[in-house]
Image: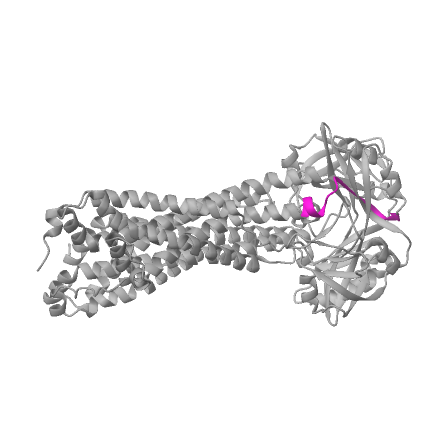
Amino acid sequence: MRTLTRKLWRDLRRMWSQALTIALVVACGVGGFLTSLSAVESLEGARDGFYASGRFADLFAGVKNAPLSLASRLREAPGVADVQTTLEQVVRVEIPGVPEPVIGQLIGIDQLHPHRMNLVTVAAGRGLRGGPARADHDIETLVSQAFARARGLGPGSRLRALINGKQRTLLVVGVALSPEFIFAGLWGMPDARGFGIFWIDREVLAAAYNMEGAFNRAAFKLAPGARVEPAIAAIAAMVKAYGGREVFDRSQQVSHAMLDNEVRQQRVMGTILPAIFLGVAAFLLNVVVARMVSTQREQIATLKALGYANAAIGAHYLQFVLLIVGAGLVLGVGLGKELGYLLTRLYAETFHFPTFEHRISPALLLIGAAITAGTAIAGTVHAIAASARLAPAEAMRPPAPPRFGPTLLERLGIQAAGPALRMTVRNMERRPARTSLAIAGVAAAVAIVIMGNFFRDAIDVVVDNQFTLGLRGDISMWTTDPVNDSVRHELRRLPGVRHVESLRFVTVNVGHAQRQERTILRGYAGRPELYRVIDMAQRETLLDGRGLVLTDRLADKLGLEIGELVRIEVLEGRQRTLMVPLRATVDEMFGLNAYMERTALNRLLADGDLSTGFVLSVEPGTEARVLAASKAMPRVAGAWSKHTMLRNMEDITARNVRIMSAILTTFAAVIAVGVVYNNARIALSERAWELASLRVLGFTRAEVSAMLLGEMAIVLAVALPAGMLMGRALVGLIAELMKSDQLHFPVVIRAPTYAWAALAVLGAGLASALVVRRHIDRLNLVEVLKTRE
């Protein structure tokens, strides 16, 4: 075995604990990188494969009632390669023994002309059989996989559905998937228990709604290279006469938008977290290698005297670094594989594909290895170069003794500090770069714990905004078409109802100059009690007398300033284009929304006192009775309970947030241990002669330990507040990078999150201190004091 190789393994054995902590920090960085980006690759791979096999449509259009003959005209739109028309209706569904309200989306399947787009894949059971069911027979249905799993349904299960005012029995014959509903939730909310997709025979659905020979939804496949904008404009013009409600591309399709948003968020996490860990690892490696070069001056001089070239000595220390990094890489790959598999399983509960497997591509492994090795080398190249620059004669001499002077405490005139504290502060001031980086490393650990718990705080605020401050009612109901607001009085007379508030929602295109966005113009009460507009600061925005109000993100996308005219194209009912001045903006969490007072909206549209929804406040314990009574009201198309939807959402989000918090807290503890322990061990090796001398002079072990561990305590004391500030800044950066049209996370960090971050890092620091104290107690005074003169 070569001399340098033997020295390398001897150094690793002697410094195994420091090497291990650094390798663990590297492993966390690599593991975080692979976890996030392999989940992204897995999601994108499953999505792209399902989109291709299921022939996911490129454009979508909704109409009120259009003849099937319109399909041939739609095929002539520029860039359109194929058109598929369907019937879809939203209904209320009842599950035997389940009192909770369930919303179902019925989609008609033409048995004679199977789907060519958005294909339905049967995952369990069988497909629909030919021939429509009679009015006195069960209706065969395929049910979406997410809803079937959440409700324990399978072939043979029966449900009841209120189809156009008539109760019908749905017989589940199969569980199915479609690329159109990879994510299925009511209005973008992850509620698999309260919302399901049901595919039934098209003729049955058409007969129930008197829409034989008609359709209300269309999907389009574009020709390769076709432009989206001209196709949308042409289709919109064709469907306008048939109550065309919306024409949009994939980016506005709910399932695709939610999946795309998740992919983008994971890319952010897979970039920021590994950068922090690898930066800390580079700092630790630099400190360790610099200390090795300092303590091995005689060995370097001897090696050079024996003829070893500078390159060979530099390569020796580089091998030391790469062995530690290599161990961290191996651990990181294993960690990334396990955590990536866990994350993929969590995603599989929200996003549903026929096949969804976790995978780490070789390219991703190579990128991770290259970034890790490059960061480590960049962080240690200065220290390694220092070993090569040492001349043999200079290396044989002891390093020049450090120069000491008055400490910061003494310069500030603070004379009460004892000798132990003055020695500690003087030692820290002597190496300001190392001290600053140590503080930054521990602060990074605090910031990561804060970030891991930020999502819990943010989701709590989102839920509080939407379901406590915003939606103060208990039950929300809606109608298929606008109805006279007198329905409100019928609802008010239901037993248990305390108050009813009317809503008006209209699908519109909001535009300014050449920019345009599709959204819902929401008409609320001017001074509402049950449904309020709440901004990011949890303040209410009153609509009374304000006119048109847009969310600030929508106004920014359109390039609008307050007072400018907004172009509003009404996409339902009597379609027309209106010009309305923008009166105010609101900084809201969800969506690109537009608001007006309901009565003002009705005046603007000039079609009477109409409503499309109602929010009810009910007496405690009467919710189920009110929901049951509303089923007999034909003009009420559907209803949902706020408490039920909230519970269903929390079942999913609470567990996922707990898992994320636990993983990031563990990662942060590894950083804290790595920084604190390595700095303490290096300080111990540097000051062993001083500490041993103090022991000979009569200082106790506790007093000697206090001098060394005091530096750790100061680092922790300074790093905790710095880490909290860093955590706040990191959370703000992540919230900004994750901001999308669907959601803007509020930057909210609660006191328990700061407390937990401090406790987690202090616990890691205490564990490191106990290990270092054990090394101090085992100092061999005679061996340590055998120093060169």
Place of residue 255 in the rendered image (x, y in percent of width and height, measured from the top left): 66, 51
Q: Name the image quarter holding the C terminus.
A: bottom left
User: Could you tell whether 488 is left or right of 158 in the image?
Assistant: right
Place of residue 551 in the rendered image (x, y in percent of width and height, measured from the top left): 70, 60
Work out whether residue 176 or residue 589 is closer to the camera in this orientation and state it. 589
Q: Residue at x 11, y 65 (%)?
A: 396
Residue at the farthest left position = 789
Place of residue 388 in the rendered image (x, y in percent of width and height, measured from the top left): 20, 68
Place of residue 249 in the rendered image (x, y in percent of width and height, measured from the top left): 70, 59
Q: Residue at x 82, y 42 (%)?
A: 500
For residue 565, above or below residue 507: below
User: Could you tell whether 401 is left or right of 331 in the image?
Assistant: left
Q: Is residue 437 visible?
A: yes
Q: Name the image quarter holding the N terminus.
A: bottom left
Q: Is residue 33 visible?
A: no
User: Could you tell whether 770 is left or right of 393 in the image?
Assistant: right
Dividing the picture into quadrants, the one containing residue 346 is: top right
Work out whether residue 731 or residue 122 is closer to the camera in this orientation and state it. 731
Q: Which residues are magenta?
A: 466-484
Work out whether residue 36 or residue 494 is closer to the camera in this orientation and state it. 494
Q: Is residue 564 magenta?
A: no
